[in-house]
Structure formats: C-alpha cells, structure tokens
Amino acid sequence: MTRRTRQSLRLDNGNPFLDLPLDVLFEIFRRLDPLTLLYLARTNKALRGFLLDRHNANIWRASLRAVESAPPLAPGCMDDPAWCRLLFEEVCHVCLEPLEHDYQSDPIWWEFAARWCTDCSGRQTVKQIPARLSATHKTPIFAKGVFPAINGAYLRKDVKDFTEKYCDDKSTTASESASEAKTIKAGKAKLLRERRAQTKAINEYSTIGKLWMGRIVQARIKEIKELKAVRYANVQTKLREAGWPDYIVSWARPFLEAHPLVTIPQALSDEEWDEIASELTKDLEVHVKPKVLTDRVRLLGQTFPDPITENIQNLAIPPRLVDVALIPDVRVVLENPDLKLVLKKDDLEAALKSQLPDLVAVWSVAFEEKLRKHIKASLKTRFPDADIIGDPLEYAAVVFTCYWGCCTGHFSSGKSKTCLRRSYDWQHSTKAFRLADQPKMNGVVDNVIKLYGKDPQTATCEEMDKIPGKLYCVKCKNSAWSWREAVVCSSDFLFAQKMFSK
Ligand SMILES: [Zn+2]
Ligand SMILES: [Zn+2]
Ligand SMILES: [Zn+2]
C-alpha cells in the first residue's frame, strides 16, 4: 500500500476524475472489466504507466476474478495486461484488424498466446523445423515437446529464435579444445531443457484456457440453438396462420430449419416476417410442390382404385396411375396451384368420377395409336424396303410362352408333362423343321418371316435362327429362344388351349 500511495499519477489535461487519490483510483479500477482497463491503459501515458506497473497487477487480477465466466488467471510466464488482452480483446494481434467471433468455436491460439485473422495466421506459423536445427539430432526430437504446436504447426518466432541460439556455433574452429566442446554441449542441453520446460508450461495453461473457452463455446452453441428454435417456432406459427397445413409445415421442417432466412439466432418479429414472408413462401412452394403433387397422385389412386382397374379390362393398353394423373383433365385438378390446399377423396370424386372412365378409354386408344406409329416408324428404319402388312403392333409381339414355370400363368391347371416329352422329341430331331408344316403359332408369323425376306412356305427354323431378330418368352423374358423351341412351346400352348376350351 505504501508503495502505491507514493506513486503519483501526473495528468496534465486537468481531468478532475484523474486527480483522485491513487487509493480511490485503485478501488475504481479494480471494479472495471479487463477490456475497459485495457482501453484505459491506452488512453494516455500516465494511465498506461499506472496500469501497466507490475505493482498494480492486483487491479487486473481483481478485475479478472470479477468476470462472470471465471477466466483463468495469468500464468507465471505472462503479464496480466497481456493475458487480459488475449482473453478478451477481439482483434488480430498482428494487423490489429477487429475480429468477429460469435464464439461457436475457440478463437484463441492458446499455445501461441494469440488471436489472429486468417491472413496473418498463415504467416505466423511454420510447419517445418529448419534443417540446420533438425540436423543437430539424429532422432526427430523436435517432434516432441520442444515447441508448442497447433495442428502440426509451430510459431515461426519460437522456431527462429531458438534455432539462432541453439545453432549459433561460434566455436567450430580447429582450435576448439575438448573442454570448450563440453561446455558448448552442456549449454545446448540447457537451452533445450529450458525450451521444453517453457513449452510444458504453455501447454498447461493452454489446457486450462481451452477448458474455460470450451465452456463459453458450449454455452454459446446452446444459446444459438435455442434462439434458432425460437425463430423456427415463430416461422411455423406464421406459416400456419398463412394457411399452410400442419403436415406440410412439419414435413418441410428440415428445409425450413436450414433456410438462410430461418436459421438465424434471433426471434422473428412481425415486421421481419412481413419482410421475409414472400421470399420464404416462394422457396417453400418450390420445395413442397413435388411432395404435394405426389400426395395428390397417391390420393387419386386411393380414390379411384375401381374405375381405373375395372376399365382397363377392356383396354388394349392399361394405364398406370401416373398415366391417369397425366391426362390433361385430371392434371388440371391435381395441379391446383394452391399448394396449401389439401385435396380430399370427396374433392377428387366430385371433380372426376363421372368422366374418368371415358378419359381413360380415350387415353388408351390414343396411346395405342401412338405406339403403333412408333413401331411402324421403327420397322421402316429397320426394314426400309419391306411392306408392313397388317397391324404393326403385332410385329412387336410374336407371342409365345416358354415351358418353364412361367407358362402356368396362362393355364389355370398347368400343362401336362406328356406335352413336354413330345416337345423334346421334336426339339432333338435332326430333320430340317419347316415352319409351314407346323400348326400356326400366331397369324402374324408369316408376316414376320416375310419381313426378313424369307418365304413362309419354305422357311425352316434353322434358317430363321440366323436372322438378327430374336425370340423371347413374353412372360419370363428368358434369354433368346430358338425358333424350334418357340414353335414347340406354342404348339403346346395351342394344344392345351384346345383341351381347356372343351
Ligand atoms: Zn491480421
Ligand atoms: Zn479468427
Ligand atoms: Zn417363360
């Protein structure tokens, strides 16, 4: 106390506040927070001298102790003002650029006792130990505990200063005596020991500092999460008020929570909602449209399972649900631009029930015609000179079924083994197998044979097997069958059909 009162704080600006007795000043200063002390120390020379005086370190410590987050006190190797600066001043220690940290991560380079901007941090650290230093030892001693390290990088200044001292060999001259060499070696060992001890101390206080900051970061992350949750809840309420159904809002939750207008740690005011509503709604509509439409198509299938399935009985080509959904008259109903509208079965029935059978029938005819045109065009490309006789659709379906299990689909009681045995003899006969001698598989076969430039009267199965077109079982899509096999199976088919029709 006596030392401090002997001090005089001379201020020439006549500020009456600073004319206070030092004891009083001391009591005021120790109640200020560390950052304020730091700024005060920069205001003028006298305050700076007073606050940075080591004998007044108590002020800083008292100030630090009063901070709610209970920061660690300065370690022995650092003075209190510098420590307070590290802990609280959000500025790059190199370029003095203010740093913005929202404390979702630790902004302090504890082992290097610094805060840096991104640009400066790259220049302050080094990944490699200079060769002349690492060459002094056979083992990679510098990998362990000599320098403080963060992610494998060292503080450039640490490495430079130490290397200069450690590798400063004034005594490599020939005259160097044994005892001199011994002294030098001992000196180096001492340097290394000291450096290691220093690093150990740094690592110790860094661990403490990181724990302190870790608590702040955790609290901040929690706070941000809570604030974002509040905002999301606000947005949810607003969307419901605007008529969005609950199930859509719930479904879109991941999208909304990640949306740049929503993922902000700040509650949503009515004014702000008015500002963001149109943009957010537009984005939401884009996001939910496929879901809403898919749901409506599903509802279509649930509402009309019968009309659709009943009507396809007589249709050449049965529509899939999506085909029905794409019929323009149906589409108009499903694509109602009001995405907030939750369609009900009743709505769909009222809008479509009476006209759906006709719509589906028209669709089927139109689709068949389209398919016919497509096949005709394909056949024309494949066989430019051929006459397409009859219905092109039939060329696409020279129907036969194979004798694997799949055939039972056609015959309610399956087909007899006798037929198979008969078929076997046929298949293994070495006699040329003239197609004209066999029962017709299907009226269109003659036309197919002609298409490939063969005479239906003389063509044999072997001849037809050499053409590029292949035969497949329409049911099991097994690999290509020979014509002989196809005829055999079709004969069985016809035979069985005759038996069952009796
Ligand atoms: Zn910087
Ligand atoms: Zn930073
Ligand atoms: Zn089959």
Image: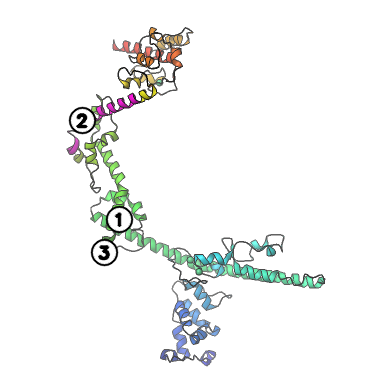
Amino acid at dot 2:
Pro
Judging depth in this view, the residue of 347 and 30 nearest the camera is 347
Q: At which x and y percent is residue 147?
A: 62, 66
Residue name at image x 62 percent, y 61 percent: 128
Numbered disc 3: secondary structure: helix
Residue 52: within the magenta? no
The residue to which callout 1 is attached is 280
The type of residue carrying mark 3 is Glu
Which of 227/455 is in front?
455
- Residue at 46% x, 69% y is 99
**Dot 1, how many residues are within 10 Å of its Cα: few (below 14), some (14-19), or many (20+)?**
some
Rendered image: mark on residue 191: none
In three-dimensional space, the C-alpha distance between marks 3 and 2, rounded to whole angstroms, equals 52 Å
- Quarter of the picture containing the C terminus is top left
Residues shaded magenta: 349-377
User: What is the distance, in whole Å, between disc 3 and disc 1 at their CAs?
Assistant: 14 Å
Whether residue 14 appears in this view of the structure is yes
Callout 3 environment at 10 Å: few (<14), some (14 to 19), or many (20+)? few
Q: Nearer the viewer, residue 119 or 197?
A: 119
Q: Residue 118 placed where, x, y %?
A: 50, 65
Left or right: where 383 falls relative to 151? left
